[in-house]
Amino acid sequence: MTAKDGSCGWSCCITSASFLVHVIVGGLCYCSGVLQLIFIEYFGRTRFETSWIISLMLGFSALAGIPATLLMYRCGYRLTVVLGGSLAAAGVAISVLCTDVRQLYLTVGIMCGGGFGLALTPAIIVTKTYFEKRRTLASSIAVTGVSIGVFVFPMLLIFLEDSFALKGLFFTLAGICLVICLCGVAMKTEKEPHKDSLKIFAGSLFCSTTFVALCVCNFLWTMGVSIIYTYLPDYAISTGLTIEEAAMLIAISGVTSFFSRVTFEVFNQSAKLDLANTFLCSICTTAILTGLFPELFKHKAGEIGYAIMLGIHTGFWGTFVSVVGRGQVGDESLARGRGYLMVTMALGLFAGAPLAGWLCDRDDSFHIAFYLAGACLLLSSVILVVVHLVGFEYRRTVLWSDCESESSAGGKSSLSTRSSQATTNEQETLV
């Protein structure tokens, strides 16, 4: 039965499975900074060398969404998620035998990252395919698992490394990755991906300035956020914090991100995000993160405030990008360009951590790396806000023109119908 037919039990099962996949994959990816500290301490290598483990894991988790789309159509959701969980678990388990940091490039970076990508993509799409009545609610619940993972994993990783050393940590993480396989088994649905879901590289979308702007924003934002989450614990320790306190900053950002995601999703469902929220949570927070982080880390309250603002921004960004993408490009066009969005995300994730690591090793300082990250977040926010404002002004102009023409002709039409027509006209013009 489908969710439309009222199979509440299986609906909850699929939502819970998708939620757990997001907890594991999102938690481990966003806690890359804690893993970075562990690798630096154990192998005694530079930040640049160890950062490639993180960048490969993050980049392949995004890039593997492309083959995952093909596997979903050929094999279904269940087998794709099981394959992803198995690959990630195998990569982490083999890491126990690694004696050099370069060997982890293959095991943790490529194998684990690729497995995460294979598992995460079906976990996102299954809720949108299976549910019909409460699709948005199910997807929102699943995605909030990322914030829960960011809260849980920082302290868990430190506890496991202190208790069982690096090899014990790898064994435990391999077992956690196997939970992804169990989640995949639960993703049984009669509705499999449509053949049209394979069309993810529509070249005609590059005629749309808005879509190109979304790709640029994806690259800049993923590059900036990967730098911050990879080097925030390391920078916090350099200011005098313990590793536990540094990990707690990541956990705080996870909690804040959870409430931010929920709050802005509620705002989005009840009414469109207003311009005040847009400016406040995109440009204002990134400006503060960019310009004031050295001053903030001179005080305990400032450190916590930085983590809170980071969580607010990351939680808001997903909702904001979704709103702008659907409003300016359209759901169908976004689906046809999903491959390009994955590639730009992967490029940003590949570039961020190694570039910042090279800067930190060269200058023996984190300031330039964090200024670079903040500038990327700020520029991506400015671009997306401009796209949002241009689209808002366009819809308002079209709607006002329709109102004037109908008023002069004596016609009567509902406001919602005119707004829908304006949005449709805009999407056709852009795409």
Image: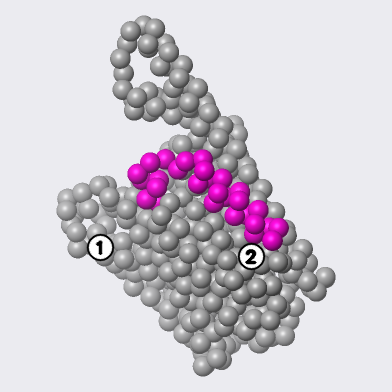
Residue ID at (43%, 63%)? 258
203 lies above or below 54: above
Specify the quadrant that holds the N terminus.
bottom left
Magenta residue check for 135 = no
Residue ID at (73%, 81%)? 45
Q: Which mark is residue 132?
A: none
- Residue 419 visible within the image: yes
Q: Which mark is residue 12?
A: 1
Q: Nearer the viewer, residue 104 or 322?
A: 322
Read off the magenta span: 265-292
Dot 2: within a 10 Å radius of its alpha carbon, few (fewer than 14), some, or many (20 or more) residues? many
Q: Which residue has dot 2 on it?
A: 228
Residue ID at (27%, 50%)? 134
Q: Residue furthest top?
A: 409
Q: Residue furthest left?
A: 6
Residue 146 screen position, x and y as percent: 45, 65
Residue 7 screen position, x and y as percent: 18, 57
Amino acid type indicated by mark 2: Ile
Left or right of 145 on screen, residue 133 = left
Q: How many numbered dots are placed on residues in this image?
A: 2
Q: Nearer the viewer, residue 186 or 218?
A: 218
